[in-house]
Amino acid sequence: MIRINRVSSLAIRCAAVFIIALVALAGWVYAASDDSAGAVPVPDSIWANEPGVRRVLAPATSFTRAEKYELMQGGAGSSKNAVDQNSFSHETQTLDFESLQRFKIGNALFNKFWVSSPSSTLASDGLGPLFSARACQSCHIKDGRGQRPVGTEKTASLVIQLKRLVDGEWVGDPVYGSQLQTSAVPGVAAEALVRIENRSHQIKFANSTLYKLHAPEYIVEDLAYGELHEDTVLSPRIAPAMPGLGLIEAIAAEDILAYADPQDADNNGISGRANWQVLSNGEKRLGRFGHKAAMSSLDQQNSNAFLIDMGLSTDSLGNPDGDCTEKQLVCKGLPNGVQPHLGESEVPGNIMRWLNFYTSHLAVPVRRDVSDPAVLAGKELFYRSGCISCHVPKHVTDKEALLTAHRFQLIWPYSDFLLHDMGEALSDGAGEGAAAPREWRTAPLWGIGLAKTVNPGTSFLHDGRANSLLEAVLWHGGEAAPSRDKVLAMKD
């Protein structure tokens, strides 16, 4: 048995909807006066020749009414469908008939359960040999966030990545690869069982209210292929929500980089850094997907999920053995799902394109209650707490974005998509690309108020340790500590 403590968590820093719903609706006020609105100016390099766009992107300074277009937080394609468990599963509302059919095919593929080879279900086999999930939907429940398992409960929503530092580069375990796989095809042993226990501590508000936080401890049992390397670190990851990913990809890299301040040149305590993905051809691209912004495109993110989570090869990641290593000989030579008449991978090009189209066009729901006085009061507290230093409210997508529906859209993701030091309590002990163990990408907050409507069991932060948005905020440290402390200074 291996027992490894992890006080790790992607910080959904100072969650906007948390402060709006919890602070405003619960009627909390500041214990001390603070007249600073915490506004972060729009960098000069963003839309320099478009003064109208710069005015729209400027942070709010008045909180007596909603901003123009704030309702449509996902741009013109925002979903106006009823609020229910399917709120994250609707298509971008500006799709034409032909595009809608492509979206529906992609939806079917996202929900499809893959099987091991050989199988009579053509273009649906090739699972494994080792895997964590059989379908995309198994992790991204109803296209929303995953949920943390309890005790020995088995769930695909949370995976355990394996990392060790070798010659300055983070790589996988020499035996178990990139991820601990808890499932396997018949005739192959799953790699291990994972059990989660919690250690608790309390944090105090200004009014002396005590609040309990829970740090997960991961216990790895029944390792099937020998011991983990002594330097291997467990790095838990919970599945994020899917809406708006195509819009994130449509933001110009230059606009994201304009918010970067790696040396904290303005001395405001915030030093956002970019992560970069180096492609197989040596090209460097800005990372924007994943809890540490390690993936530069949805195609790369989806291909990696197919390979590592399900053991399925794609045109860009073509190993049908998935995450099996050379030391796991039982994996070698097993049947795979490659069908030459369809292509050279188990997920051939057409399937990948439909899946990418689907994940690119999941609509962000419209904002609710944007003009409610309590919501506006919560928004003001969110700004005054300095949360928008990382959770940048607005972006305008590139006029030349690849997908038509995403071009030149005003969107409200509440993220700068950069890496920030979130403190030692949230470090998972492992880096990824240029990201240090304490650094996490600013999580987008749009739609977060519907997270538990879509999946009542959803949890927050990169390992799902936070059962509520308040818990997520209270885990903030490092660069976000001053904002967290302002929340703690609020009183009834």
Image (spheres, rainbow, N blue to C red):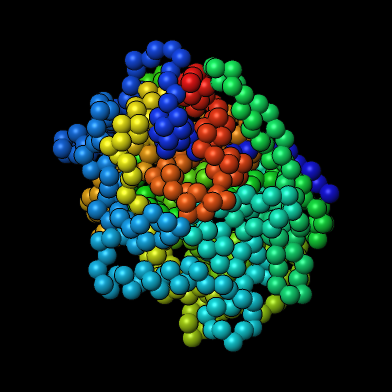
- The residue lying at 27 percent from left, 65 percent from top is 95
- The residue lying at 27 percent from left, 44 percent from top is 71
| Relative vertical location of residue 298 with respect to residue 212 in this rendering, above or below | below
Q: Examine the image and state in which quarter residue 94 appears.
A: bottom left
Whether residue 69 sits left or right of residue 198 in the image: it is left
Residue 280 position in % (x across, y down): 50, 58
Whether residue 202 sits left or right of residue 110 in the image: it is right
Q: Is residue 402 visible?
A: no
Whether residue 485 sits left or right of residue 267 in the image: it is right
Residue 137 position in % (x across, y down): 52, 63
Q: Examine the image and state in which quarter residue 320 appears.
A: bottom right
Residue 37 position in % (x across, y down): 33, 21
Q: Is residue 45 visible?
A: yes
Numbered label tally: 0
| Relative vertical location of residue 130 with respect to residue 206 in this rendering, above or below | below
- The residue lying at 43 percent from left, 69 percent from top is 107
| Relative vertical location of residue 460 with respect to residue 118 in this rendering, above or below | above
Residue 307 position in % (x across, y down): 57, 64
- The residue lying at 54 percent from left, 43 percent from top is 460
